[in-house]
Amino acid sequence: MIHSYNEWDPLREVVVGRADFANWPSNDPVFAQESKKTTWQETPVPSGPVPDWIIDEANEDLDILSAALEQCGVVVYRPKAIDYQSRGGMYGYCPRDRLLIYGDTIVDPAMMYPCRDIETEALEEVIYRANTVHRMPRNEGMTLDAANVLRLNDTMLYLESASGNQEAARWLQHKFPDVCIEVCNFYSGVHIDSTIVPLREGLVMVNASRVNHSNLPNVFKDWEILWAADVVEQGFYQYPYASKWIALNMLVVDPTTVIIDKHQTNLINTLENYNFTVVPLELRHSRTLGGGFHCVTLDLVRQTQ
Amino acid sequence: MIHSYNEWDPLREVVVGRADFANWPSNDPVFAQESKKTTWQETPVPSGPVPDWIIDEANEDLDILSAALEQCGVVVYRPKAIDYQSRGGMYGYCPRDRLLIYGDTIVDPAMMYPCRDIETEALEEVIYRANTVHRMPRNEGMTLDAANVLRLNDTMLYLESASGNQEAARWLQHKFPDVCIEVCNFYSGVHIDSTIVPLREGLVMVNASRVNHSNLPNVFKDWEILWAADVVEQGFYQYPYASKWIALNMLVVDPTTVIIDKHQTNLINTLENYNFTVVPLELRHSRTLGGGFHCVTLDLVRQTQ
């Protein structure tokens, strides 16, 4: 069974990604096109296999994350290892991007990079556990990475960006007629989860460099807002596939427990002041590979309270 | 793409089953229980691997059927060959039983014999082509074989029987709110497709030994009814897994073309009188294995006219 309607209910079962065979797609037309738009000029956009030492370190960190989640009583699944390098794919590092889960339903979206369709195979056993699977048609003008969407019970907050367009939002609304799909577009990058971090019902952390009172999504109008003015910038290898704001990409284990980058002392203080138990961990390659604790996980079961 | 809303629109793509590794389940608790209820006392209910010569002859007939469909311009898919004998499953002979297709959606029902879940694997590539897949929860009191349902555009006619209960009908109604699920229960066996045979919009053949004016489904109240009083009984090997009425189990290729058992001279005459082009073929083991031309096929695409 799959059962997850929001980002904060007590986590019972989760997928934790894996870095094996991580690869920067060299044959994906969209990936190539996006690479040309980069504002980072100091080093070239990487292409081809990710160095083994990065893969190994990333996997070490993912194993530690898995163990920490198991210690919290969460059942952890890992995607199948697929040779993305030989097949021209990307990676299994960010299952959050690949599948959107709402209730007992899985959406298999038409991702921005077509080569990422391969990642679905690594999650086949997960997909099989859904009661309903909606596959978004490919090549019909819809683009969506699952990480463009946050689940807030009756609302899905949908970031319109390079990886999520209006057509896909309309399709999603059609598939979930009882859910309000609220479209926001305060950030021209890709995913939503380094910008908006729902912590529990009524409390959300917001990236103050991208969101302000005037473009705050309507769904939060009665919520308490924690404005994150800055984060502690972490390093990366050669090319930053994520900005420093990946630091906000945390995983809520339950409405009082959060897994967060251990270097984020200010954020940790803020969360502790709000009576959160903070589990400080590390993903050394969150910027190199482009994924924090929310990205590298995919919650399958959160217990409705 | 999958696209099929009824039993008669022009067939474009279809699955034709295969008999490889056919097996009478020896470990399935429901199969064992049902076997005890048999009214056939002359030979025991078979158990274990189906003899190779039956498998071979059945496959020959399925290959001929496939070729005939291809001659009609239909694209034919075959399920993957799975070793049902070693895995305690049943067979890939009747894809009709395993998946229910409506429009671009596939329902993966909780079949009466749990061991038949294995058959889904043989159809994975088909399932992947659906835009939506609904998996009926197992072990929650719902039972449904896909062949309990006939698709009649706005209505699904649902036979309540040992292989289809009220709970599953309600679930189906919930998943397809815009479709009328009409429940009928004129036949205490299993599937519907040797009792009711829709031939085209407004014309249906009906098994007169099971259906009469008083229990005729409401959906047919304005249809012309062809009452089939009897059929030419065919043989079987050792144990009849289907009654003589499997003869009615025909495949409508388009509203003027029907594939039917070549021995059914009366039925063929009747159909020809209604201006059908009849393609007479043979499934020598339709009674031994329990599947006629409708059972052994699964239409993926029928062109909406």
Image (cartoon, coloured by chain):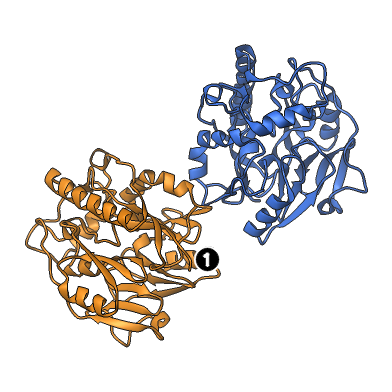
Chain colours: A blue, B orange
Q: Position of residue A203 (x, y in %)?
A: 81, 45
Left or right placement of residue B195 versus residue A223 in this view = left
The residue at the far top in this view is A53
The answer to whether residue B50 is seen in the rendering is no
Residue located 60% across and 49% down the image:
A136
**Residue tagged 1:** B176
A154 is higher (above) or lower (below) than A226? below
* Three-letter amino acid code of the residue under disc 1: Phe
Q: Residues within 10 Å of mark 1 (few under 14, many from 20)?
A: some
Q: Is residue A54 above or below residue A6?
A: above
In percent of width and height, residue B35 lies at 20, 58
Q: Could you tell me which residue is drawn at 32 percent across and 57 percent down?
A: B297
Vertical arrangement, residue B82 with respect to residue B41, above or below: above
Residue A19, visible in the rendered structure: yes
User: Measured from the top left, where is residue A21 in percent x and y?
Assistant: 56, 21
Horizontal side of residue A26 vs B136, given as left or right: right
Displayed quadrant of residue A173? bottom right
